[in-house]
Image (spheres, rainbow, N blue to C red):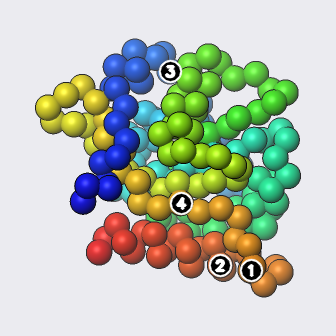
Amino acid sequence: MKHLLLFVFSAILFASAPAFAQTHTEGGLEWYTDLMQAQEKSKATNKPIFGFFTGSDWCGWCHKLQRDVFAKPAFVKWAKEKVILLELDFPRRKQLSPELMQQNNSLQQAFRVQGYPTIWMFTMEKDKATPNMNINPLGSLGYPSGAEPGKEEVKFLGEANNILSKKQG
């Protein structure tokens, strides 16, 4: 259980930031960019957050993951049923608001993300004794290397379901 409470964020950091991010729809999926909005939806639906660390305007493997996995009907169906999608973008040419950059950088550091694409599935809860939010990491994923060509979503979803089964077990 000790490993479940590795990451702590100050609720003040996120509560004091104005609503700086929006949701966007891509391929029939709703992606949040604001962690606290995603957390509220996660709490209301009892679904974990699916944090997608990406370089939207430069990362070829991120585009490949979106094309080979996220755009497939099986992933769309799975995501709508199982997770709340959160895009954590690190663009090179597109400008993000300072608040959004701070949020994404904080999460990148907390999860020790070193490459893209990286996906972390996690839940969050308010610490009862402090004004902090505890992040409970469930597991991470990347591009499903070694998958049969054209069946990347099958391997990816198998790995994702293994992570989710540990949460319930």
Q: Nearer the viewer, mark 2 or mark 3?
A: 2
Q: Are marks 2 and 3 in contact (CB under 8 Å)?
A: no
> Mark 3 and mark 4: span between their CA atoms?
27 Å
Distance CA(mark 2)–CA(mark 1): 6 Å
Image-based side of 97 in relation to 20, left or right: right
Disc 2 to disc 3, C-alpha distance: 36 Å
Residue at 59% x, 68% y: name it.
77
Element type where label 1 sits in the image: loop
**Residue located farthest toward the left when viewing the structure as drawn:** 129
Q: Which residue is mark 4?
A: 140
Q: Position of residue 167 (x, y in %)?
A: 34, 67
Q: Is residue 160 above or below residue 64?
A: below
Instruction: Please give the residue where the numbered disc 3 appears in the rendered image.
Output: 19
Report whether residue 85 is seen: no
Q: Amino acid at mark 3?
A: Ala
Pick the front one: 106 or 14: 106
Name the amino acid, label 1: Ala
Q: Which mark is residue 147?
A: 1
Disc 4 residue crowd, few under 14, some 14–19, many 20+, Cα 10 Å: some
- Foreground disc of the pair 1, 3: 1
